[in-house]
Image (spheres, rainbow, N blue to C red):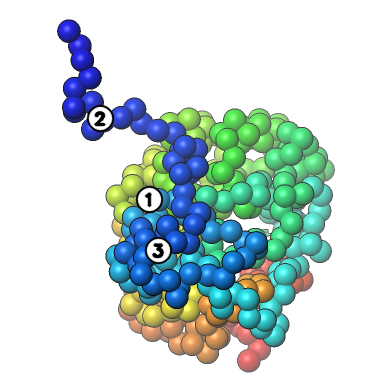
Amino acid sequence: MITASPTSRLSPPSRGWREIWRESITDAGELLAAVGLAHRTDLLPPDDAGFPLRVPRGFVARMRQGDPADPLLLQVLPRALEHEAAEGYSVDAVGDMAARAGHGVLHKYDGRALLIASGSCAVNCRYCFRRHFPYAEEIAAAAQWREALAHVRADTSIREVILSGGDPLSLATHKLEELTEGLADLPQVIRLRIHTRLPVVLPERVDDAFTAWLADLPLQKVVVLHANHANEFDATVDAACARLRGAGATLLNQAVLLRGVNDEVGALAALGERAFAAGVLPYYLHQLDKVQGAAHYEVDDDRALWLMEALRARLPGYLVPRLVRELQGDPAKRPIADFAR
Ligand SMILES: *Cc1c(COP(=O)(O)O)cnc(C)c1O
Ligand code: SF4
């Protein structure tokens, strides 16, 4: 006779990434309790209908217990500081509205068209420009990617299609298939690049169907991850990265330089080393976009340049990211060393 044995509860059927995503923490009190800070009611944000809290539980599990300065917690916990106005900080910090070349298409740089694939992310990062951009109306995936595909088709100089967002991996794999089927008859497109934080914050997203889709693409593939601190990596992230590499993707990481999170040489060096251990090379270290509500994360350029110099003295050159800032109207991300200062 077969009965439910106690051990069957230890191996539940594996759950899909959407279900795990839906179980994210969205309440600041619950988040504080999960990291052993339930007593720190002073850290609770004021009531606020703005950019909501959202963080997957697997990411929360990588936070240190009882540490209000934990670098992962500081990226996602809303704070009263966000409501302080700061000079030079606005709602469209990088001119995205001006570069719009169609529904969800941003074409700022030669040879690369960036599609705002989706308005959602698995996590809401407090420093993000997305807190203000009206992405709900700007999604390239709408109407089977029609406008985005028309734009790419009409411009034979586009060699690389970049999926960004929001987070493109918040889309179902069949939506991504729709896009790559549409690209299949465009010989000028040789590369697909995906900018995503999901393999870090919700590594379950890199599931069998997604991995198979990626592996089968007849394109060069680049996945640019987004991790700001070494502690964001764990064995589940390593496994997701291994699957992405196994599917033929080159893995890069971009980070944002954030006060209190990674603005120490040791933290940046550890990030480079840890990413590389997962098979990921550092790409950009971004100076913060000046979006309203994020000023308390700012690291000034003098300190940023000093950090880079110290980092270069410490790491092999290939683990040193490029420090850049995005300025409206520039033909590329601007290296900060070249700044007129
Ligand atoms: C950042 C960005 C790119 C990619 O720039 P790379 O320097 O190639 O990483 C492309 N298009 C837009 C609109 C961008 O903002
Ligand atoms: S776009 Fe990137 S940085 Fe912004 S909230 Fe989404 S995952 Fe975070």
- Please say whether residue 205 is visible from this viewpoint: no
Looking at the rendering, in which quadrant would you find the N terminus?
Answer: top left
Q: Is mark 3 within 8 Å of ligand 2?
A: no
Q: Position of residue 333 (x, y in %)?
A: 64, 69
Q: Residue at x 25, y 30 (%)?
A: 9
Looking at the rendering, in which quadrant would you find the C terminus?
Answer: bottom right
Instruction: Tell me the SS state at disc 2.
Output: helix
Disc nearer the start of the sequence (1/2): 2
Question: Residue 32 got which mark?
Answer: 3
Give, as a three-letter code, the residue at label 3. Leu
Disc nearer the start of the sequence (2/3): 2
Image marks 2 and 3: residues in contact by CB distance under 8 Å: no
Pointer 2 residue: 9
Q: Is residue 180 shown left or right of residue 39?
A: right
Question: Residue 275 got which mark?
Answer: none
Q: Position of residue 48 (x, y in %)?
A: 62, 65
Place residue 187 in its image quadrant. Answer: top right
Distance, label 2 to label 3, CA atoms, is: 28 Å
Give, as a three-letter code, the residue at label 1. Gly
Instruction: Tell me the SS state at disc 3.
Output: helix
- Please say whether residue 151 is visible from this viewpoint: yes
Nearer to me, 278 or 316: 278
Give, as a three-letter code, the residue at label 2. Arg
Q: Is residue 1 above or below residue 268?
A: above
Q: Residue at x 46, y 44 (%)?
A: 23
Foreground label between 1 and 2: 2
Mark 1 surroundings within 10 Å by alpha-carbon count, few (fewer than 14), some (14 through 19), many (20 or more): some
Pointer 1 residue: 58
